[in-house]
Image (cartoon, rainbow, N blue to C red):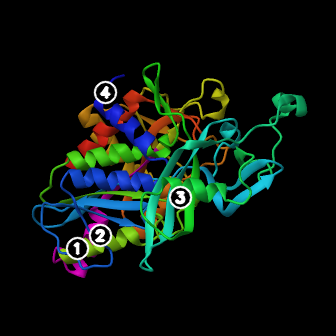
């Protein structure tokens, strides 16, 4: 399917291999639309009917459009900027005979075997010591020196196809970087120095992740394949909805994109932090609301927690509840769990079902089998921090948490339609 929104999503996937790159992309996109960047450490002066955004730790970002008149409630969209994968350890470089290796640490819960035998880039942020005794930060995205995690040959692991590949998380997921490299010089520092454009004295620290070099690609052509669809597809839909929305009379439109969802969100820039509540209160203060008025608007607000959902797998159909198995290309998914691993309940879901019916947007329901543990999202954590009614939704997806995920393009377009309608409702 050729569509400008799908092309735009593919661009985001290819340009944002890490959470820091995603936030940088979002910030530049918002700035191009006339949004003003705010600093957390400074006092805010906000105008009515204007767009603003702020970042936390370079990897989470919150953007909003103030109401034209009084601030009486908020419509919020939330998603996350991180994805499961492999992060370099602080002192990663070592040698095995003539092979230069980079030691990794597993971030979140990636489908480990999907990372074997792939050309891998290296991206993230690096902190630098400047010539004037200052500390500077630089984003890096290195695709010119591919890495690889080679798998053990089947001749040396004869039962691999029957019991699955043999691996140990500590021993077998270091990345092969080079052969016969100069032992007197750090291979990693050399390629970092070659790819950092700013002048600096030396490198202080880094947050660097591996990522698959294969670009996002249309399959079918009604499907889209790529790394980090979970959850950059949701980020793209939320960002698009906010950028195309107009200031509302009494409603604050807000989108927040969190880091660290894949590792539990318990960080300063995670959904289980007070960041969002602090932002909402500071908006209320800047718009001259009393504390009482601010607290009163929270229960009138609604948040859509947007992540991906498990689509019915054609080869493993028994893994799904037969009456709650979403199909790709059949619309967005409302996610339920009786133990509130998802934030949806009858009250919050009713608003979304009503909106879908009004705008003729197809929707489905997901609930896990009772004998398979249910995953979770930022929804319940953010709801517990803010007290705002929340519903968990998402586009159906195959191969979640693998190095190559799959969605239907039409489902993404329907999600974009829903989020746009939500911010204009």
Query: Is residue 158 visible from the viewing direction of this image?
Result: no
Q: Are marks 1 and 2 in contact (CB under 8 Å)?
A: yes
Comparing 333 with 63, the one in front is 63
Is residue 296 within the magenta segment? Answer: yes
Q: Which residue is mark 1?
A: 284
Above or below for 39 versus 226: below
Please tell me which of labels 4 and 2 falls first in the chain.
Answer: 4
> Measuring 37% from the left and 28% from the top, which residue is drawn there?
410
Q: Which residue is mark 4?
A: 3
Of the two numbered discs 1 and 3 in the rendering, the one whose residue sits closer to the viewer:
3
Q: Are marks 1 and 3 in contact (CB under 8 Å)?
A: no
Q: Which mark is residue 193?
A: 3
Marks 2/3: CA–CA distance:
40 Å
Of the two numbered discs 4 and 1 in the rendering, the one whose residue sits closer to the viewer:
4
> Measuring 48% from the left and 40% from the top, which residue is drawn there?
229
> Measuring 73% from the left and 51% from the top, which residue is drawn there?
101
Q: Residues within 10 Å of mark 3 (few under 14, many from 20)?
A: some
Marks 1/2: CA–CA distance:
6 Å
Q: Residues within 10 Å of mark 2 (few under 14, many from 20)?
A: some
Please tell me which of labels 2 and 3 falls first in the chain.
Answer: 3
Query: Is residue 132 visible from the viewing direction of this image?
Result: yes
What is the secondary structure assignment of the residue under circle 1?
Answer: helix
Q: Are marks 4 and 2 in contact (CB under 8 Å)?
A: no
Q: Which residue is mark 2?
A: 280
Of the two numbered discs 3 and 4 in the rendering, the one whose residue sits closer to the viewer:
3
Marks 1/3: CA–CA distance:
45 Å
Marks 3/4: CA–CA distance:
39 Å
**Which quadrant: the N terminus?**
top left
């Amino acid at each position: 399917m050729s569509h400008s929104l799908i092309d735009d999503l593919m661009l985001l996937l290819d340009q944002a291999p890490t959470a820091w790159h995603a936030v940088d992309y979002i910030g530049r996109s918002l700035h191009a639309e006339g949004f003003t960047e705010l600093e957390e450490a400074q006092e805010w002066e906000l105008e009515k009917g204007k767009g603003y955004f702020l970042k936390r730790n370079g990897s989470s970002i919150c953007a909003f459009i103030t109401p034209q008149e009084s601030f009486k409630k908020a419509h919020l969209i939330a998603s996350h900027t991180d994805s499961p994968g492999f992060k370099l350890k602080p002192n990663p470089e070592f040698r095995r005979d003539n092979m230069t290796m980079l030691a990794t640490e597993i971030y979140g819960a990636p489908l480990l075997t999907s990372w074997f035998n792939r050309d891998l880039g290296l991206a993230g942020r690096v902190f630098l010591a400047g010539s004037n005794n200052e500390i500077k930060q630089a984003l890096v995205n290195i695709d010119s020196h591919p890495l690889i995690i080679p798998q053990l040959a089947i001749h040396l692991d004869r039962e691999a196809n029957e019991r699955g590949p043999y691996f140990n998380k500590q021993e077998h997921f270091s990345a092969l970087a080079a052969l016969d490299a100069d032992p007197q010089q750090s291979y990693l520092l050399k390629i970092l120095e070659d790819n950092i454009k700013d002048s600096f004295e030396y490198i202080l620290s880094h947050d660097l992740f591996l990522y698959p070099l294969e670009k996002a690609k249309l399959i079918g052509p009604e499907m889209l394949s790529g790394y980090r669809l979970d959850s950059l597809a949701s980020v793209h839909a939320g960002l698009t909805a906010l950028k195309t929305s107009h200031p509302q009379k009494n409603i604050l439109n807000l989108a927040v994109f969190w880091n660290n969802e894949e590792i539990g969100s318990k960080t300063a820039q995670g959904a289980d932090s007070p960041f969002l509540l602090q932002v909402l209160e500071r908006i209320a203060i800047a718009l001259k609301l009393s504390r009482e008025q601010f607290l009163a608007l929270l229960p009138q607000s609604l948040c859509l927690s947007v992540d991906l959902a498990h689509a019915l797998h054609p080869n493993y159909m028994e893994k799904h509840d037969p009456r709650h198995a979403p199909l790709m290309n059949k619309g967005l998914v409302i996610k339920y769990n009786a133990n509130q691993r998802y934030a949806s309940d009858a009250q919050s879901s009713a608003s979304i079902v009503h909106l879908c019916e009004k705008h003729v947007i197809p929707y489905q329901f997901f609930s896990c089998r009772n004998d398979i543990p249910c995953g979770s999202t930022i929804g319940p954590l953010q709801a517990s921090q803010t007290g705002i009614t929340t519903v968990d939704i998402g586009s159906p997806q195959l191969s979640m948490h693998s190095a190559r995920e799959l969605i239907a393009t039409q489902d993404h377009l329907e999600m974009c339609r829903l989020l746009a309608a939500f911010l204009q409702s």
